[in-house]
Image (spheres, helix red, strand yellow):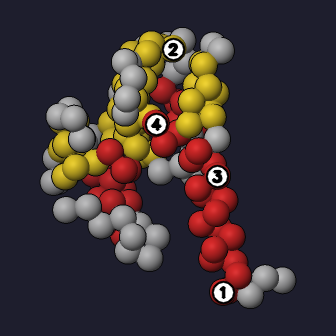
Amino acid sequence: MLSQSLYTPFICAMNHLLTTLPMHIGAYTHVPAADITWCEGDRNYSRVYFRHRRPMMVSVTLGILEARLAGQGFLRVNRSALVNEVSILRHDAHKITLVGGPVLSIARRRRAAVREWLIGGLNGERVVM
């Protein structure tokens, strides 16, 4: 069994590896999760917004993208938006502002979970105010 001092760097290294490995987002497209800023769902399609590329429309539902990006720092803030935590510039009780300008509303039923996720985080590392 790994001691706590060895276990924490191992987890950090695995998280870094997962965010830098190309993820399958649809069709023949593979990108690192860290390059995705947010995803917008539109019926059976999703528009994926990147840091340094033009947005891409993929024929995958937002729920499938959410499952593929699970554990990589993505948060579902409303029915049609999945946000990368590192792209959040600021937030309040009703909306999230992303780097680059988009402002997304937080669904009423998701507000408590979103607030807990943003403020609580793991060991207080996700404080974004």
Whether 52 is drawn above or below 67: the answer is: above
Mark 4 — residue? 35
Label 3 element class = helix
Q: Amino acid at mark 2?
A: Val
Residue 77 relative to residue 43: left or right: left
Residue in the picture at 44% in, 34% down: 36
Q: Residue at x 38, y 60 (%)?
A: 117
Disc number lying in front (2 or 3): 3
Spatial CA distance of label 2 from label 3 is 24 Å
Q: Position of residue 9 (x, y in %)?
A: 63, 74
User: Residue at label 2?
Assistant: 58
**Position in image of residue 84 (x %, y %):** 40, 43
Q: Residues within 10 Å of mark 1 (few under 14, many from 20)?
A: few
Rounded to the nearest angstrom, the CA distance separating label 4 from label 1 is: 30 Å
Disc 1 residue type (three-letter) = Ser
| Disc ID at residue 17 | 3
**Mark 1 vs mark 3, CA separation in Å:** 19 Å
Q: Of all residues shown, which one is farthest toward the front? A: 52
Q: Are marks 4 and 1 in contact (CB under 8 Å)?
A: no
Residue 97 numbered tag: none
The numbered mark, 2 or 1, whose residue comes first in the sequence reads 1
Secondary structure at badge 1 equals helix
The amino acid pointed to by label 3 is Leu
Q: Nearer the viewer, residue 62 or 18?
A: 18
Q: Earlier in the sequence, mark 1 or mark 3?
A: 1
Mark 2 vs mark 1, foreground winner is: 1
Q: Closer to the N terminus: mark 4 or mark 1?
A: 1
Expressed as whole percent of the image width and height from the top left, the position of residue 21 reads 64, 41
Query: Residue drawn at (36%, 64%), measured in percent from left and top?
Result: 126
Helix, strand or loop at mark 4: helix
